[in-house]
Amino acid sequence: MNNDQPQQGGRMEVVYFSRFTIEGLNAKSAADKYIDWVLGFGDYRRMRAGRLDAGVLRDWIKPQLIAGVTLTGRLDYEIKTRTKENLFLLHLKHRDSAADNILWRNVVRLQTIDDSVQIEHALSRSGGRSSLPLLKSLPRPRILKDLLESYGPKTLPLDIDRDATNLSPFDVRDFVKYQLLGEKREIPLVVLSPFPGNNTPLVNPKKLTEWLRGMAGVVVLKDSSTEQGWTGALTQKGFDRRFGCYGGAIRVFPPRLTPGTLLPYILPEQLLEHTESERLPIVASQISQRLIRKAMPDMFMSVVDKHDRTESVRHAQAILEMRQRGSAAIGSIQDQLHSEQARASEVESALKVLISERENQDTELKGLQSEIKDLKDQIEYRELEHLEAVSEIEIKIKHDNEAHTAALDGMQAAFSKLKASKSEQCITPELRIALEATIKTRARPVHYLTIAAELYHDRLAVLPSAWKSAKHSDAFETPEKVGELLQALAVDYHNALTSGRGDDTARQAFGRDDFAATESESVMKNKAAVKRRTFRYNENDIKMFQHLKIGVKDSPARSFRIHFHWDAEAKIIAIGHCGPHLDFS
């Protein structure tokens, strides 16, 4: 983003930029409202005395400004307006009422597009050569507030002027699906997560909304459950966990979000060292600068000077054409040449401004490089947060397992009673179907192994080593997949082998990536690895290289293996291992 350098010297800071469209309004009508605001006329007559004190001269009138003019008043008060068909430009400069070393600039572009007007309004400040003080509040121009309130339903984007959205666990998923990831969203969203200490955001949502109104919307996550719902809804749509927002962090989500988008965020550690009253201007200023860099067109603060340079070139070309045609109006041409010489002087001044802008760009580039370094540091911090999140999930799994263990104890007692009271022939087809359905309910791997062992005791032989490994697999995240593989092993795979079909056909009982007929060459040559795959069955040591597999991660939460052996003579499948990857255990 390029900004024009203040003529008095010093650093310029653009603090606000908004772009929106109002249906049923044209550039001429919108310009009339802006001139009233500048001079203190019409709906803004109560501001007239303040405008005169700031430097407006009493003899300035609306027709002058509507036609296009440059006027300089007292106290460096300056107004530039330029008018063309379907276009109006305004550059307003005045001193700060409380600190006269600060200059404020409003730059406005109004363009008629079809039956609507597009309004672009930027606000900047500049001062001495030292750094500018941090803004305590944003003096958003009243004209913007009035336009947005007056034409609310006719304003696009529709949500550019809404209050903060408070999300609960019950509506966060719909918001993510239809609002955050909606194709029609055009404004960025600033998401605030609650700080664990008091379960509220570290900055006041209402005050932040007022600061960013017209640039971005504000979304507040109610509690930790809402944070988890936010992250879960995004992961369901293919986004990483790094798109989550929790623990008091603040994140900016731009429109047209993709899994590859790099999101800026502010960590709670950056804010806790400041008082509550200091946090709002720090957060609002950082977010505003990011939004302005993305949204404001290049050279926008110099749009009037750029228009003048274009018009100067056009006039010079017209004069040259007149000379080439041998126009007799020499006197008129000389007058125009004098005018163009004055304009050339303005262009020269503008060129100096461009040189200063280039210096500004170099400074901004250094700032961006520093920001990239900060982002890398934040990525490292996010990785640490991810490890902590994994630890929290494992604790939750442990708590959930206590409830599942109680259910398993009751289930195992029922199976024991059933075996003691009924013969195999008494297991009716209906009962078998009911037990098969039970396998698909959510439990731990040992639960599914217990059910499979009881349900298919005539087909499966579960060795002690398998029981032991299953009991140490409570952390596995998708135990229902274990149940599905055990059922396919005992039913479809067993049926295929007993009917005389070979292993190449029988393996079709599983998914393409679920079955392995043997191990890799590196495992087969590794004596320790082979020993880990050797189990005692019927008084013999059996090498069980055949296995079913889930996942490849080096983690008991993500990786699972079932090693087995087909006893063709007894028509029994012996399971030697049912737990984490043997080489990771």
Image (cartoon, rainbow, N blue to C red):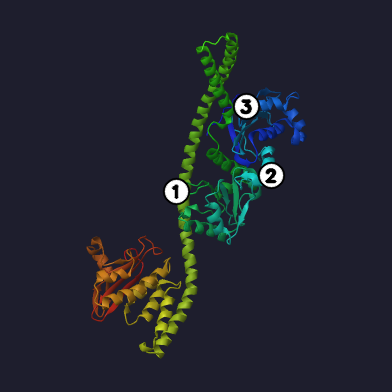
Q: Kindly identify the residue that appears in the image at 54 percent across and 21 percent down.
A: 314
- Give the structural element (helix, strand or loop) at label 2: helix
Q: CA distance from mark 2 to mark 1?
A: 36 Å
Q: Earlier in the sequence, mark 2 or mark 1?
A: 2
Q: Amino acid at mark 3?
A: Arg
Spatial CA distance of label 3 from label 1 is 42 Å
**Mark 1: few/some/many CA within 10 Å (<14, 14-19, 20+):** few
Please tell me whether mark 2 or mark 1 is closer to you in this view. 2
Residue 415 percent location from the top left of the image: 42, 84
For the residue carrying disc 2, how many other residues have a C-alpha within 10 Å: few (<14), some (14-19), or many (20+)? Answer: few
Q: Amino acid at mark 1?
A: Gly
Which residue corresponds to the image point at 77% horizontal and 35% vertical from the top-left?
46
Against 447, residue 226 (above or below) is: above
> SS class of the residue under badge 3?
strand
| Disc 3 crowd, CA 10 A, few/some/many (<14, 14-19, 20+) | many
The secondary element bearing badge 1 is classed as: loop
**Which residue is labeled 1 in the image?**
260
Q: Is residue 502 above or below residue 344?
A: below
Q: Which residue is mark 3?
A: 82
- Determine whether, in the image, residue 578 is placed left or right of residue 134: left
Of mark 3 and mark 1, the one earlier in the sequence is 3
Quadrant location, the C terminus: bottom left
| Residue on which disc 2 sits | 149
Q: Kindly identify which numbered label has been placed on residue 399.
A: none
